[in-house]
Image (cartoon, grey):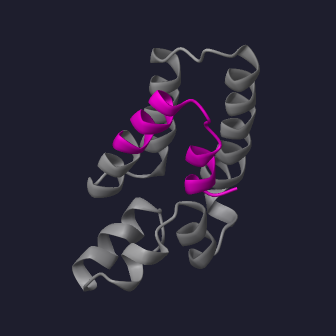
Amino acid sequence: MNLDDLINSITEVELKESLPHFVLEWKANEKDVMNLAILIERWLGSVWFKSTDESNSFYVSFNMFKREAIDGIGGLTFNERLYLFSFFNEWDSSNEKAQQRIRCKLQAKT
């Protein structure tokens, strides 16, 4: 599961529209993947799912994503990081300075 899949796993329209705003903001700033985990945890703590099952399902999905992509980032190749954090398009269309920012964000050695 990558970051886009995590967002798309939300079926409630209002919530599905609010999380991408925070993720896009994170993608544009200088903060790394550890900050993404904090951001999603804060978002999760400030929203109310209409369905307990949906809430539980998202929580499980987020924890799987966090364990694999964020906590396990040191064991991932750079291409795996680009995929898991949905940065392939940005990487391919960016200049050297933007690519350096993405490397730092994904905690890749430069």
Instruction: Look at the image and give the residue range highlighted in magenta.
Output: 1-21
Give the residue displayed 47% in from the left and 50% down from the top.
33
Residue drawn at x 45%, y 43% as measured from the top left? 36
- Total tally of numbered discs in the picture: 0
- Image quadrant where one finds the N terminus: bottom right
Image quadrant assignment for residue 46: top left
In the rendered image, residue 2 lying in the magenta stretch gets the answer yes
Give coordinates of residue 13: x percent, y percent: 50, 33
Asked whether residue 94 appears in the rendered view, the answer is yes
Q: Nearer the viewer, residue 99 or 7?
A: 7
Quarter placement of the C terminus: bottom left
- In this rendering, would 57 be left or right of 109? right
Viewer-nearest residue: 13 or 15: 13
The x and y percentages for residue 57 are 75, 30
Q: Nearer the viewer, residue 25 or 97?
A: 25
Apparent side of residue 77 relative to residue 94 in the rendered image (left or right): right
